[in-house]
Image: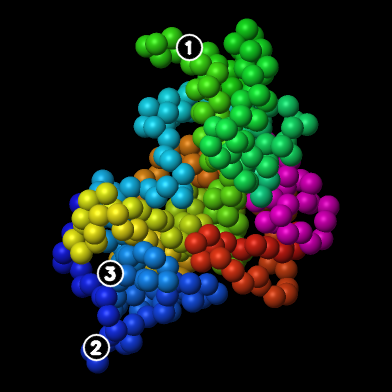
Amino acid sequence: MLCLTDVPVTRVAGTPARPPRPPSLRMAVRDPYPLYRTLRTHYPLVYDEPFGAWLVSRYGDVRAALADPRLVPVPEEGPAAPPEMGRLLDRALRGPALAALTAAVERGAHVLARRLAAREEVDLVAEFCDWLPTATAVAALGLPYEDTARVHRWCRTGLGPPGGGRAELAAFLRPLSARRRAHPGRDLLSVLCTARTADGPLSDATVTRLVAMLLDAAGEGTARALASFLANLLDSPRQLEVLRARPALTAGAWAESLRRDPPLHVVLRRAVQPVGAIPAGATVACLLGSAGRDPDRFTDPDRYDAFRPDPGPLVHDAGPDALLARLTAEHGLRALLTALPGLRRAPGDRHLADDLVRRSPRTLRVRT
């Protein structure tokens, strides 16, 4: 458990032994890294009044906070899926279903990459990263291709509570599920529709919930992580060439990108019990963007090193989100390198991030 009783607490202005109280996170949208350094060094546990949360910034403290049962996801992030739902989906994504998901990623990546090959310059974010997770979900579930745009909207904007987009998804899936129950195929929707528990077959409501979880995994977070991964490699052309020759090293390069440039810089938790100086009911902001660049944990932490021996993941690499993101990165990179042998950054200004919580390139213009 997190032991915040040993972490220095800041509630008031600084003393001569340290710099003045740091600005709020809200003031560091363009470039948060100088603030992260100040927080880690002088304010490892501080209450940020404008942001309305206690900030935890060091690698060890953030890792412990994310695993502390006294700190739970805040309601704004949406209620977590019941554990049994996650276990059902994990079981479904094995064997033939995992093979189908992997094949869907590979096929979708190559289709999208080949479409870009005839063009001299393209934006990988808008034309590859944003669409590959959706294309994968459509193919893996065996959904009609003509409904890709609708599925993409669900992936990007979320489904919300059962009375919102979830009801629309349920109506969309109902006739498809009926056909899969009568004549199952090899796609993931067939796997879900024919799965059984001790209570019998999964209900339509449960199938809808599991499909919603997969579409959520194919959402903005996966697209942003893929964009940052490709940007890191394009900014490190020698490392990219090594991966071209040795694709088995891609998994480590992906983990390193998540360390250096996570798609989500701030993860919020609510204290259901007092945790050291943090009172019950308070919000805790776990700064993943700061923890991943903690020099006490990583050598030369600001540098992207695709072959770093231990990128030290902050979150458990399991579940549909992590699985789909990893498959998307590995097969997406392979498809781009195959279809676009001259892939490189296009000249011009780089897009500056304008969101502190969710950070990634909004454009990634490349020459093919």
- The residue stretch that appears in magenta: 107-129
Side (left or right) of 82 relative to 346: left
Location of residue 7 with respect to 157 vertically, above or below: below
Residue designated by label 3 = 45
Which three-letter amino acid code belongs to the residue tagged 3? Answer: Leu
Location of residue 316 with respect to 4 vertically, above or below: above
Mark before the other along the chain sequence, 3 or 1: 3
State the image coordinates of residue 291 (x, y, percent, origin top left). Answer: 36, 64
Q: Secondary structure under badge 2?
A: loop
Q: Secondary structure under badge 1?
A: strand
Is residue 178 in view? yes
Q: Residues within 10 Å of mark 3 (few under 14, many from 20)?
A: many
Quarter-of-image position of residue 284: bottom left
- Cα–Cα span, label 1 and label 2: 64 Å
State the image coordinates of residue 252 (x, y, percent, origin top left). Answer: 45, 53
Q: Quadrant of the C terminus?
A: bottom right
Is residue 257 in view? no
Mark before the other along the chain sequence, 2 or 3: 2
Residue beneath the point at 71% across and 55% down? 126
Residue designated by label 1 = 201
Residue 94 is one of the magenta-drawn residues:
no
